[in-house]
Image (cartoon, rainbow, N blue to C red):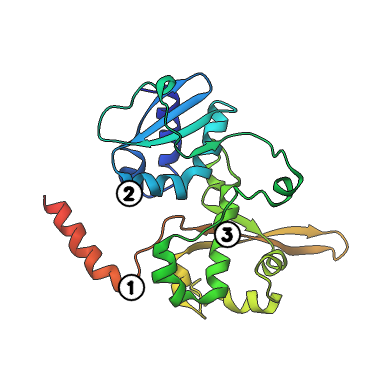
Amino acid sequence: MSVVWDSIKADLRGTMTAEMWGQIIRPTTATEAPGRLVVHHPDRRLLSILQNRYSQQISQVAETHQPGLSIDFINGSQATPDASNIETQPQKIEADGYYQHAYTAIVQPDKIEAFSQYFRWHWRPLLGPVLSELIRELRQMCYLGKGHDQIRRNTAEVTQHELARRLGVSLSTVQRYLRRDRYGKFIKNPHLNKFILDVEIITKYDDEKRKVVNDRTRFTISIDEPIAPDDEAEYTKLSKRQNDT
């Protein structure tokens, strides 16, 4: 058992849905060695999701508990072995480090941003390229928070000008896609309401204009993928079956 990993798990619980935490994080156990944590998950498929989707988030939380901690992931159905005796070379995430070559220092090829397969197959065709990229950008901004700074784990603050720059589109395009009705729902593509749960305009006082002006927008984002419309019936059926057992 690892006290450090138990603390990390507790922090992660507030950053995702209860269902996702129960499937991905709760089954894990870990053992410790000096400067190293070995995390064990009994399900190979869920371990892959843990590594590919949550490794960056885990490393940030780990940094707040033990700076410089190296984390390895392993799969198996038995109890986790002693971390100091593991000879395999599982995928590793480093909470701290540096690049040795000029090219890698600039490109940083280990930092990869990707959509989940579910998003790519089910949601991208419904959202289109602009909104798909918008969601990816906003989700990346959510990982600025550390430790108990939960408000920044599912929120992103950005100006519309900066958002347009990141997406490679005009400001008017961003404004058109983000236009909402009087109830706060997105008009151009209603599917966006599944991903952006709340929008708050942050203002500031402009000394030159001598009035309060809009400064930036705070988006509350769904970090987990919503169930797509064509999967809702199957999801309802499976959920009912699980609740009945």
Question: Could you tell me residue 169's position as x and y percent?
Answer: 68, 75
Residue at 25% from the left image edge and 63% from the top image edge = 235
Q: Amino acid at mark 3?
A: Leu
Circle 1/circle 2 CB separation < 8 Å: no
Point out the tag, 1 or 2, that comes first from the N-terminus. Answer: 2
Point out the tag, 3 or 2, that comes first from the N-terminus. Answer: 2
Can you name the residue that lies furthest to the right here? 208
3 or 2: mark nearer the eye: 2
Question: Could you tell me residue 214's position as x and y percent?
Answer: 71, 64
Identify which residue, 144 or 219, lies in the foreground: 144
Residue at 53% from the left image edge and 38% from the top image edge = 93
Q: CA distance from mark 1 to mark 2?
A: 24 Å
Q: Is residue 155 left or right of residue 157?
A: left
Can you name the residue that lies furthest to the left here? 245
Q: Which mark is residue 229?
A: 1
The answer to whether residue 242 is visible is yes
Circle 3/circle 2 CB separation < 8 Å: no
Point out the tag, 1 or 3, that comes first from the N-terminus. Answer: 3
Q: Is residue 233 above or below residue 146?
A: below
Q: Can you identify the residue that label 3 sits on?
A: 138
Q: Can you identify the residue that label 2 sits on?
A: 45
Question: Could you tell me residue 110's position as x and y percent?
Answer: 59, 47
Residue at 46% from the left image edge and 72% from the top image edge = 124
Q: Is residue 185 above or below residue 42?
A: below
Label 3 crowd bin: few (<14), some (14–19), many (20+), radius 10 Å: many
Q: Amino acid at mark 2?
A: Arg
Q: CA distance from mark 1 to mark 3?
A: 22 Å
Label 1 crowd bin: few (<14), some (14–19), many (20+), radius 10 Å: few
